[in-house]
Amino acid sequence: MEKLIEFFFPPRCAFCGKLGKSPCEDCKKNIRFISGNACQKCGIPIGDTALPFCPSCLRENFAFERVFPVFYYEGVVRKGVHLFKYRGFYQNAITFSRLMVKKILEANINADIITFVPTSRDRYLQRGFNHSFLLAKNIGKILKIPTIDLLTRVGYTKPFYNLSRQERQREIKGKIKLKKGYENIIKGKKVILVDDIFTTGATANECSTVLLENGVKCVFVSVLAITKFTR
Ligand SMILES: [Zn+2]
Ligand SMILES: [Zn+2]
């Protein structure tokens, strides 16, 4: 798929869209990777503290093991995600998935299956493809782990924009299902769930809950970026 993408889309910086190397020299200077002592749940930096979790994860009871965010959702990263999701820069998936793989490898988790957050039918029809699928497919290819389309959405979900954490949780509850015929394949397996942005974690949590209820051993969440304030 990478070759195909490269054929149709000349190399551009995944963050600003400029033709050439990705990231370009300018963006390289402005990209800040998440690093250092991190929350054992959501992966954000927590600095020097005796507690393993950030304040919001201390309140939450997420079903997944932990999140591996590469960046905060800000600055050039935000711009790159916007190009990827709304401006047809599909080739950004190559740069983004490589960075996500690096983060997964650091954690040494030996997952069995890669899957991704399903998009709603309406949004799929609007945009033509699921961005998380594109990231998941690339990650699976690099790690040599099968990428399986396990989850589906049922019913209507309001757009999450402007909804609070609790509203999002209520809105997504019961709207994610395991596709038929995968029960035996996932039993006892370690799964990496891929999404582009982690905001409140409501969707990732619901997907993880469904996977765990159906016999998955544990779920890790790989995201390109995590938002700073809404949690
Ligand atoms: Zn750039
Ligand atoms: Zn946290």
Image: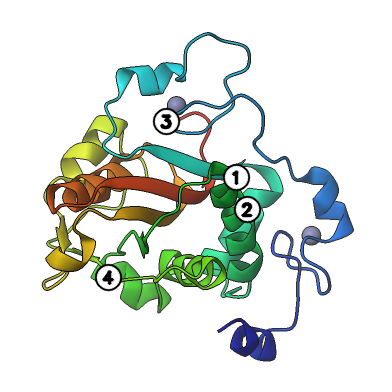
Of callouts 3 and 4, the N-terminal one: 3
Q: Amino acid at mark 4?
A: Asp
- Whether disc 1's CB lies below 8 Å from ligand 2 is answered no
Does 218 sit left or right of 137 as displayed?
left
Mark identifier at residue 210? none
Q: CA distance from mark 3 to mark 4?
A: 31 Å
**Marks 3/1: CA–CA distance:** 15 Å
Q: Which residue is label 4 attached to?
A: 122
Q: Determine whether the residue tagged by mark 4 lies in a helix, strand or loop.
A: helix
Residue wearing tag 3? 41
The residue at the far top in this view is: 50
Question: Mark 3 touching mark 1, by CB under 8 A?
Answer: no
Which residue is at a point 19% across and 47% down the rendered structure image?
Answer: 212
Q: Quadrant of the N terminus?
A: bottom right
Image marks 2 and 1: residues in contact by CB distance under 8 Å: yes
Image coordinates of residue 166 in percent, x first then y, are 24, 31
Residue labelled with disc 1: 106
Q: Residue at x 47, y 18 (%)?
A: 52
> Which quarter of the frame holds ligand 2?
top left
**Residue at disc 1, secondary structure:** helix
- Are discs 3 and 4 less than 8 Å apart at CB? no
Display coloring: rainbow
What secondary structure is marked by label 2? helix
Q: Residue furthest right?
A: 25
Which of pointers 1 and 4 indicates the residue nearer the eye?
1
Asked if residue 198 shows in the view, the reply is yes
Q: Nearer the viewer, mark 4 or mark 2?
A: 2
- Dot label at residue 102: 2
Asked if disc 3 is less than 8 Å from ligand 2, the answer is: yes
- Give the mark nearer the N terminus: 4 vs 2: 2
